[in-house]
Image (spheres, rainbow, N blue to C red):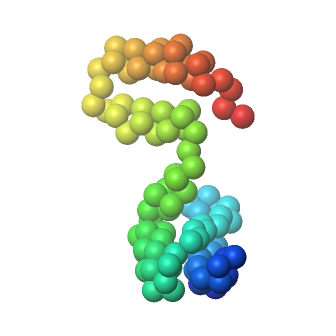
Amino acid sequence: MVSIGTSKKAKKKFAYRYKYYDNSGNRREKTERNFETIEKAERALIEVKAAILDGNASFVENDNLTVEQLNEIYIEANKTNWKPTSERNHIYVMNKYVLDYNGPSK
C-alpha cells in the first residue's frame, strides 16, 4: 500500500506499509517513508515484496538487529570455516569485551 501525506510546506511525501508473515508464522510489517515520488515508493515496495517472496525475509527483518543478534548470525555463518579455537576465541572476546560493554540486550 502506498500512501500520500503532506508536510508543513505542503510538499507531498510518500510511504509504504507492507504486512507479511515470516517463516515461523508471525505477522510482521515493513514500513518506509519520506519518498519524494510515488514511483520511488512503489519501486521500494516492489523490492521488499520480491525479497520476501524469494525467501529473503531475513533481509527485510534484520534491519533493526541488536549487536548480540548480529553476533549470533555471524557465528552461525562462519562456524564451518573456523577451527574450534577460533570459534572459542571469538565467543570469549564478544562476551567479555563487546557484549558486556554494551550492557544487557533488553
Expressed as whole percent of the image width and height from the top left, the position of residue 14 reads: 58, 80
**In this rendering, does residue 95 appear at all?**
yes
Q: Which of these two is toward me, 34 or 101?
A: 34
Numbered-mark total:
0
Residue at 52% across / 52% down in the picture?
A: 62
Q: Position of residue 82 (x, y in %)?
A: 30, 25
Toward the front, the furthest residue is 9
In the depicted view, which residue is nearer to us: 14 or 81? Answer: 14
Which picture quadrant has residue 7? bottom right
Left of 58 or right of it: where is 10? right
The quarter of the rendered structure image containing the C terminus is top right
- State the image coordinates of residue 65 (x, y, percent, origin top left): 56, 45
Whether residue 92 sits left or right of residue 81 in the image: it is: right
Which residue is depicted at the point 65% across and 23% down?
103
Visible residue check, residue 21: no
Q: Quadrant of residue 85?
A: top left
State which quarter of the image contains the N terminus.
bottom right
Q: Position of residue 78 (x, y in %)?
A: 34, 34
Position of residue 106 in the picture relative to residue 21 (left or right): right
Q: Nearer the viewer, residue 30 or 32?
A: 32
Q: Residue at x 58, y 39 (%)?
A: 66
Instruction: Say above or below: 67 vs 51.
Output: above
Q: Is residue 83 above or below residue 60?
A: above
Q: Residue at x 42, y 36 (%)?
A: 74
Question: Seen from this angle, which residue lies furthest right?
Answer: 106
